[in-house]
Amino acid sequence: MEAQKFEKHILCIGAGYVGGPTMAMIAAKCPQYLVTVVDINSEKIKAWQTDELPIYEPGLLDVVKIARGRNLVFSTNVEENINKADIIFVSVNTPTKTFGEGAGKSADLQYWEKTARDILKFSDSDKIIVEKSTLPVRTASAMERILNTNQKGIHFEVISNPEFLAEGTAVADLKSPDRVLIGSRETESGIKARNEVVDVYANWVPRERIITSNIWSSELSKLVANAFLAQRISSINSISALCEQTEADVSEVANAVGQDTRIGNKFLNASVGFGGSCFKKDILNLVYICESYGLKEVASYWESVVRINEYQEHRFVQTMMRALFNTIANKRIALLGFAFKANTGDTRESPAIYITQQLLEEQAHVVITDPQALNNARHDLEGITKNLEFETDPYKAAENAHAIAIITEWELYKKLDYKKIFETMTKPAFIFDGRNILDHQKLYEIGFNVYPIGKAAKTHFK
Ligand code: NAD
Ligand code: UGA
């Protein structure tokens, strides 16, 4: 690849769930740019260079293949690529801090700061630095301080361009985003840099969907968007508990409420709880920021979204325990799905982790199956050998089980032959549908005792 024939050199630091797909899309849509993605994890970079990508994301390989070898490069050479770049996207992980001040809530910015220092060290010319990672509001100001106190006479313009893609639908989200948000300082150089980033997206995103704003609004909007989405799930999940007590049906309630266009019908599926790498961490980060500004009531309002989620996960296990006659010791229980949602192998913060741990605590024998997430599940449950099995075939997982629990809404689980499964199970057989994806009446007629979320249970007991 001849570097000089490209109009612009774009670099992304961090080849994870966001960096990889986002840069693949930019490269596929903009053959005039050279797009390089670097990471310190050489295994990951190696995988991006093959057809066995390091993440499972429907349609992603096709996008990667359009550009890889043409204008898309994956590399471990951070130093050399920093200096060549005009625009540097930083998409490293920003997990919840586990130590010191703010532990358990605030964002751990050590990976982020390390990249800022690398950028400073290896740059000899002016550059635009784009915050792609999700960051606390006002991070750009720290970034600017680190970068612009240099003795080299070079200027860095920091831009915020948070990512809104959801895993499992990343390709469609990137191809046709609801909006792209680009925030900058409202100075002459800030607006110039912002326009350069707008130009990148304008290659395929309609101009009216590219929103520009001041940099703090952009940083904060990302946290707020996730908090609002998660709040909807916690709202409907809290109502699911009330439905179970009153014979109201949470799906009917969600449908009736969501038909109001002011409310809308998306993100109202009651579930075993939300998972994923971002909702919990971003809300807790928002809580921490509010606390640090002395906004106690605001902090506790948002914290309750996370508390309801924990309550929902706990409630699911409690329902299983009560239904199974208050003892699950030595009972085989099959968990269908371990990923935090369908169409991904990602298990970060998956409710499955908590549920498995609780069931093991009660000395149940847990069998986990999932079409994409078994490797990550093994890693999450590393060190546990007793009473735990991993099984690729859901039919085998259910054999001799007292109960099945649907944890992830994989299409595959809607289509299983439940009659065949019922026949191989220990009786009475139970099914706990943590995603409300199955035909509960049909399962009941087969002979199962059925426990959905937010709907009356259907049991054969008098
Ligand atoms: P990830 O863990 O999958 O990827 C981050 C990558 O950065 C890792 O591969 C890591 O090795 C690399 N890295 C860390 N420090 C580095 C350094 N100094 N130099 C080079 N590489 C380095 O994380 P992710 O899920 O892609 O998330 C990245 C950011 O995007 C987070 O802030 C997250 O909140 C945000 N985000 C994630 C999603 C999502 O769906 N996962 C969506 C929107 C936003
Ligand atoms: C979420 C947001 O949707 C993205 O816009 C955002 O970019 C991303 O977080 C991020 O910042 O990381 P993601 O976590 O990949 O994306 O997946 P979602 O589709 O939002 O699902 C999150 C969790 O909520 C899953 O466990 C899912 O099963 C659950 N969920 C979702 C429900 O329980 N009910 C619903 O109605 C919707």
Image (cartoon, rainbow, N blue to C red):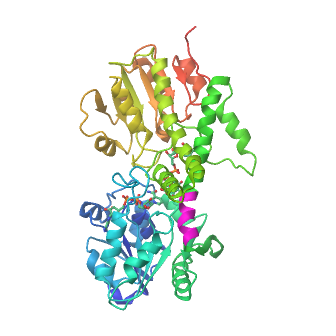
Image vertical order of residue 60 relative to residue 417, above or below? below
- 361 vs 275, left or right, is left
380 in relation to 112, above or below? above
Asked if the stretch drawn in magenta spans residue 152, the answer is: no
Give the position of the N terminus as an image quadrant: bottom left
The answer to whether residue 421 is visible is yes
Residue 67 in the figure: left or right of residue 219: left
In the image shown, does 319 or 417 lie closer to the viewer? 319
Looking at the rendering, which quadrant does residue 6 occupy? Answer: bottom left
Q: Pinpoint residue 361: horizontal percent, then vertical percent.
A: 34, 27
| Principal secondary structure, stretch drawn in magenta | helix
**The residue positioned farthest toward the front in the image shown:** 294
Q: Which residues are magenta?
A: 216-224
Q: Is 265 drawn above or below residue 418 in the view shown?
A: below
Residue 225 location, quadrant:
bottom right
Q: Is residue 26 visible?
A: no
Q: Residue at x 43, y 64 (%)?
A: 21
**From what the image shows, is residue 342 above or below residue 55?**
above
Residue 363, image x, y percentages: 32, 22
Q: Which residue is the extreme one toward the bottom? A: 153
Q: Quarter of the image for the C terminus: give it.
A: top right
Nearer to us in this view, 296 or 370: 296
Q: Where does residue 415 sit, x and y in percent of width and height?
A: 50, 34
Q: How many marks?
A: 0
Residue 222 colored magenta? Answer: yes
Instruction: Point out residue 58 in the picture as x, y percentages from the top left corner.
Output: 45, 55
Residue beneath the point at 50% across and 27% down? 432
Residue 103 or residue 450, whichever sits in front: 103
- The residue drawn where x is 53% and y is 61% is 164
